[in-house]
Image: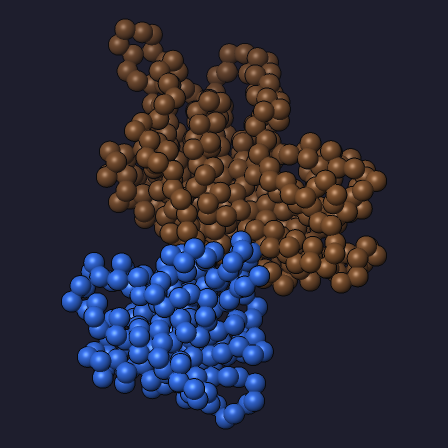
Amino acid sequence: MEGCEAIAEAAVRVGCRFFAGYPITPQTEVPEYMSRRMPEVGGVFLQGESEIAAINMVYGAAATGTYAMTSSSSIGIALKTECISYLAAAHIPAVILNFQRGGPGIGNITASQSDYWQCVKGPGSGGHRCMVFSPSTLQECVDIMGTAFERSQRDRNPVIILLDGCIGNIREAVELPDMRPAPDIDASDWCLSGCEGRSPRQLLPYFRPDPKTCAEQACAMYERWQKEDVLVFEEALADAEVVLTSYGTAGRIVNSCARRLRDTGLRVGIIRPLTLNPFPAASFSGLDPAAVKLVIDVEMTKPAQMAEDVRLALNGRIPVKSLEIPSGVLPTDEDIYEGISAILQGEGIHGI
Amino acid sequence: MMEHKILIAGFGGQGVMLMGQLLCLGAFLERKKVLMLPAYGGEQRGGTSNCTIIISDEDIGSPSVRRYDTIVAMNQPSFNTFHGFLREGGQILTNKSMVELPEEDGRTTAVEIPILETAARLGSERAANMVMLGALTAACGMVGKAFVQQAVVSELGKKRPDMIELNLAALDAGYSIMSDPCPVK
């Protein structure tokens, strides 16, 4: 299946029944697919007059307890951040797909990873945070969809799935989740469902009666994510002398390069975050500085962004070098292999 | 590790994406790892159209390819644009009636496939892309002919059951052309 269609179908199968979108390459196939699929499952598809309209429609639909989703790309997500902040303030769940394109500005439509800071650090004003997933393959995208909706509903907080134009456009074989009859999360204690027999509810992004309590509850949630919700792919860390780290499309390329590097005799480990927030800091802090000489961070953006969190987690115990592929360039296996080899040679670690 | 990187290029309407999808489905049926990255212009018919296909025994890395093992050029602009992306020792299959090969450069191995003539002889020029798919299946050697036949039957049989015999015959003919001992220019 094509990436956008597989991801959209997975969302439908795990219970998404409202989708509002607005066209922008490289994700237009998601709203296109949803426009014919939603009516088939009794859901609603709406095309907004803008990205901002679309996510505000999601705000309204999700307030009724419906699994709701929107998607866009980089600059479109920038427009949506206003309402993502509103969702967080009003405690309304939603799933937001970001098919990253090259940037800054309008950029280009080639795959990129330049929105790490945008989505992980500041998805809107006001200092709130979103859980951010970062699948590498189409199968991982499909597998993660149920977890994304469940956690968004559980926390009543927006979730972002950080993708790119490559994942959206490739065709791969995928095993889709089974069709769930209906979302099994009970939202009746908070959602807007008609107030007959009870007092009216409001889900507003302002007039917080007690800012201190709200802030403390949010922080407690973020801390709980860090303890309980980290997802990470780790490989061959036990005897690694060099550890490669990356996410998304860069992650699948790094996996392939690690095999080639191991063929040269280098002991290569991999830490590939599947959640960028919460970040798998413990995977890095658990590395043994006596064994691991170097961590190489590979990102499709320049300057590197995730590298800051890698350095924070390592706290100076192991050196970190970044291989930075400029935003809007989809690297080949050879580009990444040669880039990593050059870093290793520069550090005097391994002659390839 | 066995991995084969293929580019199929032509213009919209020549069945470039269909060839790619059928080869991928054949590879999937044979339980290979397979990835396809399509690229095309705004037009469905007449615009540029190409797709990258990677078939492998192991997990596939980047969909972006520096050098291809096999390139299919369905028209002259595709040949001109992409023949430089062939790896040393790789092979280009061309649509004989639409691609004029340059003077021998000693580097590019091009095989001219008379897809239009072959398809016309079998009953309809519309099956020309199936002739090329057969030739490509033989050239890449990563997918058994039987699996590509199965893909053709399952994908095209539903839409045009009346055309299935022609499509399979065209596939077979293309496969046989590549089995000819001396088609190399």
Judged left or right of residue A272, residue B176 is left
| Chain letter for the blue colouring in the rendering | B
Q: Residue at x 44, y 89 (%)?
A: B182
Asked if A35 appears above or below A122 in the picture, the reply is: below
Q: Residue at x 48, y 16 (%)?
A: A207
Quadrant containing the C terminus of chain A in the rendered view:
bottom right
Look at the image and tell me whether residue A276 can be seen. no
Residue at 80% from the left image edge and 46% from the top image edge: A293
- What is the x, y in percent for residue A345? 79, 59
Q: How many marks?
A: 0
Please report the residue visible at 39 percent of the width from the left and 52 percent of the height from the top.
A2
Given residues B90 and A153, the one toward you in this image is: B90
Percent across and percent down for residue A177 are: 38, 38
Is residue A51 or residue A330 the one in the foreground? Answer: A330
Residue A272 appearing in the image = yes
Chain A's colour?
Answer: brown
User: Which x, y percent locates residue A56?
Assistant: 39, 33
Q: Quadrant of residue B95?
A: bottom left
Q: Residue pushed farthest bottom?
A: B103
Above or below for B181 versus B25:
below
Pinpoint residue A60: horizontal percent, then vertical percent: 35, 28
- Residue B144 lies left or right of residue A89; in this view the side is left
